[in-house]
Image (spheres, rainbow, N blue to C red):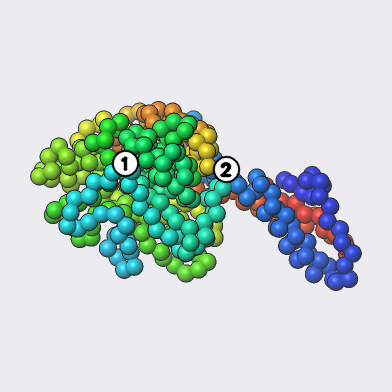
């Protein structure tokens, strides 16, 4: 519990108004002051509240609710993919669109109808902010190859990014988000986005619709349905005002042709040392439903199998992970006079 005495701030004013007016004056001053504190305005991603709140020592069941596909629905936009041609994303491809409302993520403050959201279909992550990381104009680097992993090294990583479902296979044949099936084209496979609700409670949904891994689900034998019919659909949801982020997991069929490789699910802040990773290791197929959660540095965790979901693991349709910023709560007036207030709150 924090209060003005602990924070070495004194708020005492000679006002001729009633204490009612003083209350709102002091309260507004408090909020302006709180927003000026660097640690408040630049919240660390690893401090976001997670549900399930699992740790590296415990598993907690993920919550569930009905999954609603947005692909092909009214007002949904196809960002990447096609109904007529095969789509294989390059390592250096990035797609973007303008966020429709203000959104806060760690150190990033996105402005509605101005700031861009960037998506890497080859690696399946969503980035907030600019494209300045690394030596090129791509979110990590235009150098190519494995440098475009979400965290290849301490010099190449996707800062201020989130990923509901990505993969690492250490070869350029294993790129994600192949997005075409000759017998399944309506709606198009690929990446869709849609805004739902009314201000100030709108929700932006980014859906990866029936996408998969290129090598094991297309390139080996593109005429065999046992390959190109493998898919999974999932969403990243951004909530206006609350800045809550959710990963929703939808329809998916059987696992990969091989258990080679692994998947990552994470939130990363402005530095690779500020990260939350949801993962499940060991035998069994449903660790997505009861994952562990790791907080700390992403290096050596997003580029190996230690903190990952194995390739053959699958989820129960409808589960989701939720991450919400910690904010001060329980504001209480502990003492009041005609000229002063004493306030306390939970940080």
In the displayed image of the protein, which residue is found farthest to the bottom? 17
Name the residue rendered at 53%, 42% in the picture: 270
> For mark 2, what is the residue?
44
Q: Is residue 241 visible?
A: yes
Judged from the image, the secondary structure of the residue bearing numbered disc 2 is: loop
Decide if residue 94 is on the left or right side of residue 24. Answer: left
Name the residue rendered at 87%, 67% in the picture: 15
Task: Find out whether the residues at labels 2 and 1 contact each other: C-beta distance under 8 Å.
Answer: no
Query: Which image quadrant is residue 73 in?
Result: bottom left
Q: Vertically, is 312 above or below 162?
A: above
Decide if residue 45 is on the left or right side of residue 119. Answer: right
Q: How many neighbours does mark 1 have within 10 angstroms: few (below 14), some (14-19), or many (20 or more)?
A: many
Image x and y of residue 17, in percent: 85, 71
Q: Nearer the viewer, residue 209 or 270?
A: 270
Image x and y of residue 100, in percent: 45, 63
In the displayed image of the protein, which residue is found farthest to the left? 223
Decide if residue 33 is on the left or right side of residue 308. Answer: right
Q: Vertically, is 259 above or below 99?
A: above
Q: How many neighbours does mark 2 have within 10 angstroms: few (below 14), some (14-19), or many (20 or more)?
A: many
Q: CA distance from mark 2 to mark 1?
A: 28 Å
Judged from the image, the secondary structure of the residue bearing numbered disc 1 is: loop
Query: Which image quadrant is residue 339 in?
Result: bottom right
Q: Is residue 249 visible?
A: no
> How many tags in the picture?
2
> For mark 1, what is the residue?
91
Name the residue rendered at 29%, 54% in the picture: 80
Image x and y of residue 65, in percent: 39, 54
Query: Which image quadrant is residue 24 in?
Result: bottom right
Which comes sooner in the sequence, label 2 or label 1? 2
């Amino acid at each position: 519990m924090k209060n003005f005495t602990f924070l070495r701030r004194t708020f005492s004013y000679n006002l001729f108004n009633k204490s009612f007016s003083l209350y709102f004056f002091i309260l507004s001053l408090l909020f302006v002051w709180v927003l000026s504190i660097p640690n408040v305005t630049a919240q660390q991603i690893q401090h976001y509240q997670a549900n399930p709140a699992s740790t590296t020592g415990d598993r907690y069941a993920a919550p569930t609710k009905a999954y609603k596909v947005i692909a092909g629905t009214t007002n949904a936009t196809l960002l990447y993919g096609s109904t007529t041609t095969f789509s294989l994303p390059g390592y250096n491809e990035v797609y973007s669109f303008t966020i429709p409302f203000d959104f806060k993520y760690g150190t990033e403050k996105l402005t509605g109808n101005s700031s861009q959201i960037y998506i890497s279909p080859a690696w399946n992550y969503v980035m907030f902010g600019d494209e300045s990381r690394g030596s090129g104009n791509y979110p990590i680097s235009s150098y190519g190859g494995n440098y475009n992993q979400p965290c290849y090294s301490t010099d190449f990583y996707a800062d201020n990014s989130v990923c509901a479902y990505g993969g690492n296979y250490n070869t350029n044949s294993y790129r994600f988000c192949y997005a075409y099936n000759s017998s399944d084209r309506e709606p198009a496979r690929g990446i869709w986005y849609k805004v739902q609700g009314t201000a100030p409670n709108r929700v932006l949904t980014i859906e990866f619709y029936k996408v998969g891994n290129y090598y094991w689900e297309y390139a080996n034998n593109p005429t065999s349905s046992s390959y190109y019919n493998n898919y999974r659909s999932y969403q990243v949801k951004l909530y206006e005002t609350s800045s809550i982020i959710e990963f929703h997991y939808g329809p998916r069929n059987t696992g990969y042709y091989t258990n080679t490789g692994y998947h990552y699910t994470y939130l990363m802040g402005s530095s690779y040392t500020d990260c939350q990773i949801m993962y499940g290791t060991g035998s069994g197929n449903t660790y997505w439903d009861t994952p562990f959660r790791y907080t700390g540095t992403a290096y050596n965790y997003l580029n190996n199998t230690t903190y990952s979901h194995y390739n053959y693991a699958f989820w129960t349709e409808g589960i989701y992970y939720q991450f919400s910023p910690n904010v001060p709560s329980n504001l209480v007036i502990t003492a009041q006079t005609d000229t002063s207030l004493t306030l306390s709150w939970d940080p």
